[in-house]
Amino acid sequence: MEAVMYGTTPATVQECLPQLVRMLEKKGDLRALPPSILSLLNRFGVLQLNGELGPNAAFVSKSLYQQWHNQVQAILPGYREALAQNLPRIEQWLANYCPDISMGQRWTVLAGWLLDLGLARVLREVGWQESEPSRFWIWFFEAPDPELIRFGVRVQADSETQTNFGELWVEDVRKIPPLPLNLRSQDIRVLWTLQSGGASRPPVADLMRARYFGLVRRQSTGDEVVIPCFNPQSLESLDNAVTKTARGILARTLLQSDFAPVIPNGDEARRAIYLHAFSRLFMQSGLRELLNTGVLVLPDSPLPASWGTWLARGNQARKNFELPFSKHFND
């Protein structure tokens, strides 16, 4: 079973999930959980006192997941065609703005910007993803596809400089450390100060943190930001390319008039959660297609902490989007 946390899930809730998952796996009475855990999960809308899941949680059974899997498989031929037709737009952008692009930067643009941020944005535009959680959602996949690679994006914002720090997370990529960097606003400010050539030199302690995370490299001429940096102009250009590509892909696949994911009968209250869960399954399947066709390649050696990160400043920089982070609990 897999528990997927979408949004800012409190640490206290995360600590309770292993016991909740074990109980779900055994199909036991959730009211038998320790009173302290039952009370806490109830307070955060994960569990009701009667043993049913709360409004912030949903259970995707093995049969429902299989129906979703079959639906995705049925539209994959159209997805492949849509990729072939629309991916050149992104490739042209990369050729114009990143002629010496590394595979890590390709992952950032294609997996992070296109498959995650871009597709999610278009799904919201057309009302297919109806809402975002007020704080977090959790869904439980009873029997997920073990061959799919889980991934997501986290964007942290510094309001003072209107600068965002983005980070792509990919489960099967050997990144050290494997979890988000959780930078402070001050760290983001330091990066943009260096990148924009600000007159004031950041404090030594802040520079040392940036060097430690591999975001800054010390050169003979001073400290240099080594991750992709988008100014408003290049960010707008990337955003336009991503949005047009995502619209082209979805117009050929998910947005067909006769397509809709199966929603369990009588559970319309959790419809928004189910739509997000299905969307993640679709995005993961899309990533597998990029890997199968060689557009992206999994690295064969450990990667630095700065892999998959970027800095952006402009209206298109997305704020306060938390990482769709998945955890597996297996006994």
Image (cartoon, helix red, strand yellow):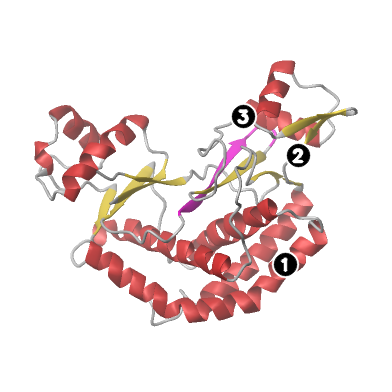
Label 2 environment density (alpha carbons within 10 Å; few <14, some 14–19, many ≥20):
some
- Residue appearing at x 27%, y 49% in the figure: 57
- Residue appearing at x 74%, y 32% in the figure: 216
Q: Who is closer to the viewer here, 141 or 304? A: 304
User: Does residue 321 sit above or below 253 in this rendering?
Assistant: above
Where disc 1 sits, the SS reads helix
Q: Label 2 is placed on what type of residue? A: Val
Label 3 environment density (alpha carbons within 10 Å; few <14, some 14–19, many ≥20):
some
C-alpha distance separating marks 3 and 2: 18 Å
Instruction: Find disc 2 in the rendering and name its residue.
Output: 226
- Which range of residues does the magenta coloring cover? 150-161
Q: Nearer the viewer, mark 3 or mark 1?
A: 1
Q: Label 3 is placed on what type of residue? A: Ser
C-beta proximity under 8 Å, tags 1 and 2: no
Locate residue 193: give its quadrant: top right
- Residue appearing at x 13%, y 42% in the figure: 30
Residue 158 is labelled as none
In primary-sequence order, the first of circles 3 and 1 is: 1
Q: Nearer the viewer, mark 3 or mark 2?
A: 2
C-alpha distance separating marks 1 and 2: 22 Å
User: Does residue 168 sit above or below 220 in this rendering?
Assistant: below
Instruction: Find disc 3 in the rendering and name its residue.
Output: 185
Q: Who is closer to the viewer here, 182 or 28? A: 28
On screen, residue 160 versus residue 74, left or right, reads: right
- Residue appearing at x 29%, y 47% in the figure: 56
